[in-house]
Amino acid sequence: MKCPFCGDPNTQVTDTRENDDGEVVRRRRRCVHCDKRFTTYERIDLKMPHIVKRNGNRSDFDHAKLSDSMKLALRKRPVTTEALEQAVDRIEARLLAMGENEVASEKIGELVMKELKKLDKVAYIRFASVYRNFADVDEFSEVIREVQSRPKRGRTSSPPPADPENDLFGN
């Protein structure tokens, strides 16, 4: 590592520490030539694939764009920011695991729909209606039926029948 003060390439590491999650290593260094001290940080530099759009154009992967599109679908839905970020992280991890230099935008859309389906069914339908560009109400209804046909988590039976004596409205 070159000294930022005098440019000499001979520096010594005097202290090394990792941050809490182990993602970044902080190193204190001392220049052998001018004896000045400075800090460097090391982190893994993973290269996300380029996105190939439907029209053939290519663009860089954009974390903010992915997150914003999911936030839009989840607008006014009871999903925490933490759950959203975890979903975005899972999508990015899958893209990295593919090991490809380029990924079709359709593949990213499918990954987003898969994550939204787990997070919130309404958000999933919102995103699917835009992503799949429904031509008519029948296509929209088909997606709704698909979501409704899946059993709800945590509910194994139908709710108990209403108790007429405890009916708040006296019906």
Image: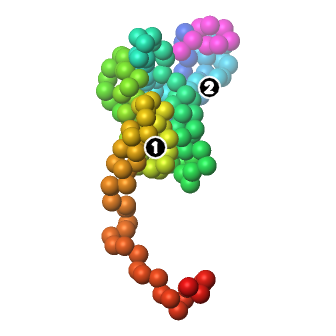
Is 2 magenta? The answer is: yes
Q: Is residue 147 above or below residue 34?
A: below
Please report the residue visible at 57 percent of the width from the left and 47 percent of the height from the top: 81
Which is more toward the observer, 133 or 26? 133
Mark 1 or mark 2: name the one nearer the start of the chain: 2
Which is more toward the observer, 142 or 26? 142
Please report the residue visible at 50 percent of the width from the left and 88 percent of the height from the top: 164
Q: Quadrant of residue 31?
A: top right
Q: Check if mark 1's residue and mark 2's residue have beta carbons within 8 Å.
A: no
Report the residue marked by disc 2.
39
- As drawn, the residue found furthest toward the top would be 7
Question: Residue 70's spot in the image, x, y percent?
Answer: 52, 38
Disc 1, SS: helix
Which is more toward the observer, 47 or 166? 166
Q: Is residue 117 above or below residue 31?
A: below
Q: Is residue 49 above or below residue 127?
A: above
Please report the residue visible at 55 percent of the width from the left and 28 percent of the height from the top: 65
* Circle nearer the viewer, 1 or 2: 1
Q: Quadrant of residue 108?
A: top left
Left or right of 69? Residue 54 is left
For the rendered model, the colour scheme is: rainbow
- Report, in whole angstroms, how far the alpha carbon at label 1 lies from the one at label 2: 49 Å
Q: Quadrant of residue 32?
A: top right
Please report the residue visible at 61 percent of the width from the left and 13 percent of the height from the top: 3
Label annotation for residue 146:
none
Per the rendered image, the range of residues in magenta is: 1-8
Disc 2, SS: strand
Report the residue marked by disc 1.
125
